[in-house]
Amino acid sequence: MSVETWGQIRANPKFQAFVKKRNRYSLIMTILVMIGYFGFILLVAFDKPFLAQKLSDAGVTSVGIPLGVGVILFTIVLTWIYVRRANKEFDAEAEAILEESTK
């Protein structure tokens, strides 16, 4: 890609709106993941008795185990959502902007 083409792409208002939308979405997803992870870590640090509670009288599994698995599953789901949107919406939009700018 030539410098001139790159300059045309960067000057395109559609490209600027695309970058703003993609960055906002990425920031929201990052914040959600951080809330999940840091929330769990803060529970470990400040509320160990809650995490140590047994799920049942006869069981040995504490509340912390399903919460930890939940954090992992939450992250996997958020990653899947992001990748799905990136592959369907963001890639198509970026390709359209590129085609428009190289004409």
Image (cartoon, rainbow, N blue to C red):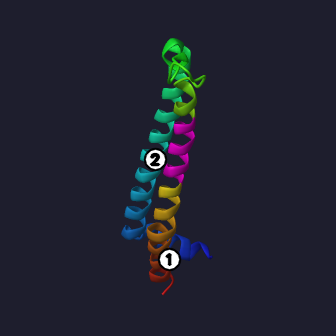
Determine crowd level at label 1: few under 14, some 14-19, many 20+ residues with C-alpha closer than 10 A.
few
Left or right of 23 in this view: 73 = right
Q: Is residue 78 magenta?
A: yes
Task: Tell me the element at label 2.
Answer: helix
Q: Earlier in the sequence, mark 1 or mark 2?
A: 2
Task: Determine the residue positioned at 51% across, 12% down.
Answer: 49
Task: Determine the residue positioned at 62% across, 76% down.
Answer: 2
User: In the rendered image, which quarter contains the N terminus?
Assistant: bottom right
Residue 56 in the image, given as x and y percentages of width and height: 50, 23
Q: Is residue 35 above or below residue 86?
A: above
Residue flagged by tag 1: what amino acid is it?
Glu
Q: Which residues are magenta?
A: 69-79
Q: Which residue is mark 2?
A: 29
Residue 18 in the image, given as x and y percentages of width and height: 41, 64
Residue 59 in the image, given as x and y percentages of width and height: 57, 24
Q: Which residue is mark 1?
A: 95
Separation of disc 1 and disc 2 at Cα? 23 Å
Residue flagged by tag 2: what amino acid is it?
Met
Determine the main secondary structure of the stretch shown in magenta. helix
Residue situated furthest front in the rendering? 58
**Residue 11 image label:** none
